[in-house]
Image (cartoon, rainbow, N blue to C red):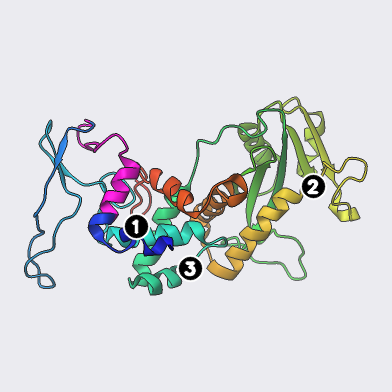
Amino acid sequence: MSVLSKPYMHDEAAAFAHVESIIWPEGPVCPHCGVVDRAYRLTGVRSKPSKKNPEGVERHGLWKCRECRKQFTVRKGTIFEESHIPMHKWLQAIHLMVSSKKGISAHQLHRVLEITHKSAWFMAHRIRECMRDGALSPFGGNGGAVEVDETFIGKEPGVTKAKNARGGAHKMKVLTLVDRDTKRAKSVVVDDLKKSTLVPILRENIAKEAFVLTDEARQYQGLVASPDFSGHDWVNHSAGEYVRREDREVHTNTVEGFYSIFKRGMKGVYQHCAKKHLHRYAAEFDFRYNNRSANGVEDVERGEIALRAVVGKRLTYQGPN
């Protein structure tokens, strides 16, 4: 049976029960006082009457804490807070986003979920916010290889492309690291590709025992004698070298494979992205790459991983609070 056919994808009460089972495995957690499993469910409660709903609507998933006596739902303190979109539509959106290899546009979400484009766009950004994982341990911690590369996306705001100019100086820049052993990626939006910008990021995210692999770009050349890592080697793309013949382990094809998905998604699905939002789009592609089938994670589990990360990641229309 398709995941989209499951009851929690269509029934609001089932949707709340599903989210509660994922977020509260030990029982309901009061967001006001933090007490675990000391609340009771309120049933038959309806919202205030309105012109659209003269009799009000049933409030699903409502709990009351026995300690602080305050009411709450599983929406409180999550990306769902203060959203009027039904929970089952949130679950549909999460499934569509985590299972679409190259992403799904806000226009497509708006058509499928039958909500406004503005709501679909904001909903997608809230979901991307919960996909952001800042807790990844340093790459190459077991002495393995870490591939590093950069790519160009869209257009850098305020920068005009010079006539007959080559390269990506007028484009937004993204730096990506891929740990070959754990098969995980981490992307960072950077303002430029200077050594002074990139090396601190590498030091922060790559373990000292790691072996770093890059292309021939000048900003990486100083790494070969750097005490920050166990070693550094590179391939010369300008000379047509993509895999070292003597040692076929020297290449950056893994991170290039990540970029093939990332760039196709950004150009073919999203088409335009403001720089202030680019880090969330990058996090979305990182999330799907890190939780892909090759890592033993299928669509349903990927959706549950995203659901566990919704707590504490509020995102308002003006920006994260």
The reply to whether the magenta stretch includes residue 17 is yes
Instruction: Give, as a three-letter code, the residue at label 1.
Output: Tyr
Q: Nearer the viewer, mark 3 or mark 1?
A: 3
User: Mark 3–mark 1 contact, CB under 8 Å?
Assistant: no
Residue in the image at 71% along x and 67% along y: 162
- Left or right of 3? Residue 35 is left
Query: Which mark is on residue 105?
Result: 3
Q: Quadrant of the N terminus?
A: bottom left
Q: Quadrant of the C terminus?
A: top left
Rendered residue at 86%/43% (across/down): 248
Give SS at disc 3: loop
Residue 69 position within the rendered picture, expressed as x and y whole percent measured from the top left: 10, 36
Q: Residue at x 34, y 66 (%)?
A: 119
Of residues 177 and 273, which is closer to you in this image? 177
Q: Residue at x 33, y 42 (%)?
A: 23
Q: Left or right: where does residue 215 sit relative to residue 182?
A: right
Mark 3: give few (<14), some (14-19) or many (20+) Cα within 10 Å: some
Tell me which amino acid carries mark 2.
Ala
What residue range appears in magenta? 15-35
Q: Which residue is mark 1?
A: 317
Picture coordinates of residue 64, whole percent (x, y): 13, 41
In the image, taking residue 85 as reference, residue 104 lies left or right, namely: right
Q: Secondary structure at mark 1?
A: loop
Label 2 – label 3 distance at C-alpha: 34 Å
Q: Nearer the viewer, mark 2 or mark 3?
A: 3
- Identify the mark nearer the N-term, 2 or 3: 3
Quadrant in the rendering for residue 247: top right
Res. 270 mark: none
Q: CA distance from mark 2 to mark 1?
A: 39 Å
The local secondary structure at tag 2 comes to loop
Q: Which residue is mark 2?
A: 217
Residue 126, can we see it?
yes
